[in-house]
Image: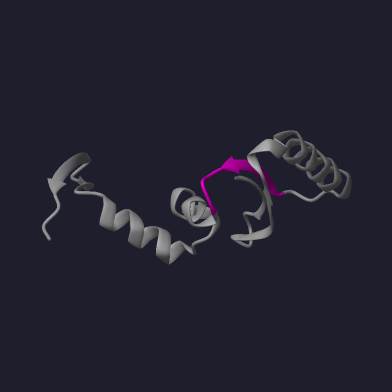
């Protein structure tokens, strides 16, 4: 599947999400271009991207920043790292995470 996402960074939310079959790549690219040109004409600043994934669920996992709020993203990050850097007396120290 091909997904066309119109994302408002300031609001932190997806404005529109369109799905296209893999065989409709040209239509997806044309829709992206039309959307970007319309937004430019109106002076709207949003992120418009085309992404590929097996399905919407896979897209939400691989590109969570479009679908999750800041707290969810931070939680995901915390659970995925095993070490972290701490600023200690003008030096960065890497410490092992203790679970």
The percent position of residue 21, horizontal first and vertical second, equals 66, 44
Q: Is residue 42 left or right of residue 18?
A: right
Magenta residue check for 51: yes
Q: Quarter holding the C terminus? A: bottom left
Side of 29 relative to 10 (left or right):
right
- Position of 7 with respect to 33 (left or right) is left
Q: Position of residue 61 (x, y in %)?
A: 44, 53
Residue 29 position within the rendered picture, expressed as x and y whole percent measured from the top left: 74, 36
Q: Is residue 78 left or right of residue 25?
A: left
How many marks can you see?
Answer: 0
Q: Position of residue 14 (x, y in %)?
A: 64, 59
**Which colour assignment does the render follow?**
one colour
Which residues lie in the magenta part?
A: 46-55
Q: Which residue is painted at 34% across and 62% down in the image?
A: 75
Q: Nearer the viewer, residue 27 or 66?
A: 27
Camera-side residue of 29 and 20: 20
Q: Chief secondary structure of the magenta span? A: strand
| Residue at 88 percent of width and 44 percent of height | 41
Residue 63 lies in the magenta-colored region: no
Image quadrant where residue 76 sits: bottom left
Q: Residue furthest top?
A: 26
Quarter occupied by the N terminus: top right
């Amino acid at each position: 599947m091909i997904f066309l996402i119109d994302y408002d960074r300031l609001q932190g939310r997806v404005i529109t999400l369109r799905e296209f079959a893999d065989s409709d790549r040209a239509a997806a690219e044309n829709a992206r271009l039309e959307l970007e040109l319309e937004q430019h004409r109106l002076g709207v600043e949003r992120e418009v991207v085309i992404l590929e994934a097996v399905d919407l669920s896979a897209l939400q996992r691989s590109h969570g920043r479009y679908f999750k709020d800041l707290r969810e993203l931070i939680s995901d990050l915390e659970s995925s790292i095993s070490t972290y850097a701490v600023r200690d007396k003008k030096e960065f120290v890497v410490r092992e995470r203790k679970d």
